[in-house]
Image (cartoon, grey):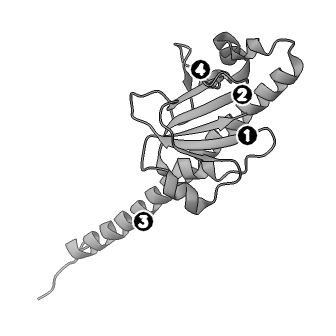
Amino acid sequence: MKFDEKGRSMIEMLGVLAIIGVLSTAGIAGYSKAMGSYRGKKLADQVQLVTSNYIYYRENSNSREDMYKQDVINKILLPPEMVDKYGNCIHALHGRCQISRNSDGSDEFVIRFGDLDKDTCVYLLTLPYEGYTKRVSVNKIGPNTALSSGTGHRFTGQVSATDAAKYCEDEQNAIRWVY
């Protein structure tokens, strides 16, 4: 008996599909990790840019009261990509942010970024905040609650990755930088 073989067997095809599936899964995982890292860096850049704009405005303006007005914040302190069509502050992960005077009435400037997942929260907390930053805090917020709600954990120096991992929840974290 002689068989004419043409093409591949079903087992060979299933083997090839299995290998493609494993390689695709590894590629998607790597891409997701790279995008998460990019977003964390983009958020850190946004915090740094707003801080730099605040410092520049404070040192070169005659009126410190003006820098807490919403139109000054939206037009001068925030880059255009952080202001939506309604005038709200939105950060790189499409979460809420708020730039304002400290709610205790002091002359402190506050930047709040909310709606952060655990990995992003840990990344942002462990960055070195030097210079003008007085303190950093993190707390869990609800999806419809104000970014200024909650007591959270306060830090005055560098936060270790271990501590940050303990204080950041799985989702809905808010970080507050006070200048």
Identify which amino acid the numbered label 1 is placed on: Lys
Residue position for label 2 = 108
Name the residue at 73% across, 51% down. 128
Image coordinates of residue 107 in percent, x first then y, are: 73, 23
Q: CA distance from mark 1 to mark 4?
A: 26 Å
Q: Which residue is mark 4?
A: 83
Quick one: label 1 or label 2, which is nearer the N terminus? 2
Q: CA distance from mark 4 to mark 3?
A: 40 Å
**Residue lying furthest left in this view?**
1
Which amino acid does the dot numbered 3 rest on? Leu
Q: Nearer the viewer, residue 136 or 46?
A: 136
Residue identifier under label 1:
134
Report crowding for label 1: few under 14, some 14 to 19, many 20 or more residues within 10 A (C-alpha). Answer: some
**Kind of residue at badge 2:** Glu
Q: Secondary structure at mark 2?
A: loop
Task: Find residue 123 and report its horizontal and vertical position in percent.
Answer: 60, 51
